[in-house]
Image: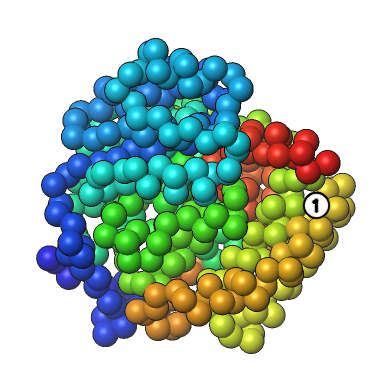
Amino acid sequence: MSQAPSDAQVPPTEQFVPTASSGTVDDGTVSVIVVNWNGQRFLDRCLSALLAQTHRDFEIILVDNGSSDDSVPFVKERFPSVRLVESPVNVGFAAGNNLGLGVAKGTFIALLNNDAFPTPSWLESLLWAMQSDDAIGMCASTMVLASDPGRIDSAGIAVDVAGIAWDRLGGRPVTDTEDTVVEVFGPCAGAALYRRAMVEDIGFFDEDFFAYMGDVDLAWRAQWAGWRCVYVPEAVVHHVHSATGKEGSHFKNRLLGRNKVWLLCKDYPASLWRLLLVWAYDLMAVGYAIASGRGRGAVQGRIEALGKVRRMLAKRRRIVRRVSTRAMVAKLHPVEQPLAVRRRYAHLGTAENGADRSPSPINRGVREVEKQDG
């Protein structure tokens, strides 16, 4: 196993390199999990693109979240090799992926949105990067907008000192991506590869989150445990970004506000001055939401979050921690001016909650839950 290179901002003595030898054998097998809710119109292109991968040693697991659009019979007839896991209701993105993990056999776990269409070398590129170092637990893809393939949707997750998460290089030209593999905070779970040994070490998705920011929470926990994440420019996926992300529904704003509070309670490095900075920026985010007519959900979500603060703090105490607070803070992006923060989300058409990072099948899926929620 090779030693992980030292971060320029973190002294080598602060680096911990976990091993991938927890009983698993790196045989190159991959389990690809696709969570679906009424996405039949995307499945032919998505699953056909997976079957055209240059890396052949993988299985496809489709978790259906109670679809009513004939997604299940379509997959059974058109893609009989795909393993179906059927949930009678929409359990959300987090629980959906956990259901898929429960039947997955691969040494590596790939996640893919049902409206994301990988190029043929996607899996091969991710796997090549992952296998270059046992300390790498996560790999991020180049997600480009299907409607504008010259523009980036995500190049991994970034998090700043104010606790705000966003998709790296979102909205930028594809020519702005790095030429080589680089270290990032985490991957967007809409197109990502995870090492099973890492998942066994720290756990997978927190189902309390349902949707929105679950991949950020997973990245935080992985970073605390000493696992690395790299962005792989050659692993390209075309993504049909959900129009729901621009609608600013009450339900979505509520979950964004709620999950942001939980994320900070659970994962953020403790420090009085940093927490003051976090809440100052969050107050500005709420103020922007109110000014734009979407404040009810943002405020309600934050209030709702208070009901499970103790639960999140209990989870915080159970997080595997192998790096110091100083080393973790060094991984965070510097704080930017509020207007610069808003520009991070301009390509999504939303900025009020500090992040709109939920993979789009669940963005659409929350409509069903919103109706039930009233």
Report if residue 330 is visible in the image.
Answer: no
Q: Is residue 192 above or below residue 118?
A: below
Point 45% across, 82% down: residue:
325
Query: Looking at the image, which residue sits at the far front?
Result: 88
Judge left or right: residue 295 versus residue 278. Answer: right
SS for callout 1: helix
* Quadrant holding the C terminus: top right
Q: Is residue 214 above or below residue 53?
A: below
Instruction: Give how far across and how far down residue 340 sits, in percent.
Output: 64, 57
Judge left or right: residue 362 versus residue 319. Answer: right
Report if residue 188 is visible in the image.
Answer: yes
Camera-side residue of 122 and 152: 122
Point 51% across, 20% down: residue:
71
Instruction: Give how far across and how far down residue 186 sits, in percent.
Output: 42, 57
Instruction: Give how far across and how far down residue 55 sits, in percent.
Output: 20, 33
Judge left or right: residue 225 versus residue 309. Answer: left
Quadrant of res 125 = top left
Point 83% across, 48% down: residue:
294
Q: Which residue is mark 1?
A: 297
Q: Is residue 307 above or below residue 313?
A: above
Instruction: Give how far across and how far down residue 280 sits, in percent.
Output: 73, 73
Instruction: Say which amino acid is labelled 1.
Output: Gly
* Quadrant holding the N terminus: bottom left
Label 1: how many Cα within 10 Å (few below 14, some 14–19, many 20+): many
Point 44% across, 67% down: residue:
221
